[in-house]
Amino acid sequence: MTNTRRERAIALRPVEITNQQLMEILSTVRADMSTVKGQIGNVEQTLTNMNGRIGVLATTSTNTISAIDSLARTPLAAPVRAKLTVAAPVVISNHEPTREESNAVYAHIHNLMWKPKLSLRTPENILANNLKPRWDTNVAFNKSPNREIAERLLSNLERRFGSSSMRRSDLRKRLHTNFTSRTRRERMSDDEIAETNALTRRAARADDNECRHVLAYKDNKEAIDLVMLRDCANTLQKAVMSDGESADEMDEDGIKHVIHIVQPGWRSDECNRFIALVDTYAVQAMGSSANQRIRRITTSVSNSAVPDNISPNFPRWALRDGL
């Protein structure tokens, strides 16, 4: 209690202030009030600026909301059209697809589709094959279910070949070719299928024969030209090496397959010798796999005319009697 009274006595003790000190205090208060007034003015200006900005923001926000509302009312097809417009330049090509690109697409389509025959009929392969898409050959290409199958396959092909020169129309064209080929084959008789398979094998052998001979001559050009005593460039052409072939037949002993050859009569003896020489080098390059090659036996010479698809730079010495 004593301490409380003492504190009150101290707090209530009057403080003496001189006139000079009072004037200094009033001067300081006036300066502080002036500063506060200036700060209040700055605050008012800031609020004015913010009000203008808020008005602009409100207007912009209103426009934005209106745009979003307008977009929400737009039919769903509109964004799809915009997407297609942007994506279109990606698939535009300045040149036609090459043969290699086309073959790659055909091979990929063949791998994606169901096959009537499998080289390896394991349960796993059979199950996987049955899960693959299969054309309905009794229905048109643009009708269900073929239409839906084509769309799914197109999506797969575009992902795989979209960066090449293949356009969507090119991919669709090759899908249609696969469909028509399968439809035509399923409507063939057994004899027609056998004949088609023979023609396919014959064409494949012709391509393989040309490739092997061209590589053999390229790798051994100096030695071959030395034997022939001339430059044999431009002699190896597919039309030149194409012989009349029989179907695969058994030899006289009935052990191995052989192919009987009808040699073109328009080729000179020197041309036939050159082809036989290149063939020797081609067989050597095959190594041990040469044993799997079907033996070719020349049985006769035809009176066929010079093919029209031989290039103009074909040497005259390779033609019989310089035809």
Image: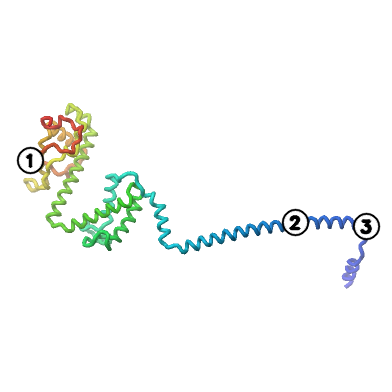
CA–CA distance between discs 2 and 1?
A: 116 Å
Across and down, in percent, residue 320 comes to: 11, 32
Q: Amino acid at mark 1?
A: Thr
Location of mark 3 (residue): 19
Badge 2 marks a residue whose secondary structure is: helix
- At 12% from the left and 55% from the top, the residue drawn is 191
| SS at badge 1 | strand
Q: CA distance from mark 3 to mark 1?
A: 144 Å
Q: Earlier in the sequence, mark 2 or mark 1?
A: 2
Name the side, left or right, on which 12 lies relative to 274: right
Instruction: Look at the image and tell me whether residue 309 can be seen.
Output: yes
Kindly check if marks 3 and 1 are in contact, taking CB atoms under 8 A apart as contact: no
Q: Amino acid at mark 3?
A: Asn
Q: Amino acid at mark 2?
A: Gln
Q: Quadrant of residue 233?
A: top left
Quadrant of the frame with the N terminus: bottom right
**Front disc: 3 or 2:** 2
Quarter of the image for the C terminus: give it: top left
Residue 299 is marked as 1
Residue 166, position in %: x, y? 32, 48
Give x and y (percent) for residue 298.
Answer: 9, 39
For the residues marked 3 and 2, what is the alpha-carbon distance in whole angstroms?
30 Å
Total marks in image: 3
Pointer 2 local density, CA inside 10 Å: few below 14, some 14–19, many at least 20: few
- Which residue position is annotated with label 2? 39
Residue 156 x, y percent position in the rendering? 33, 55
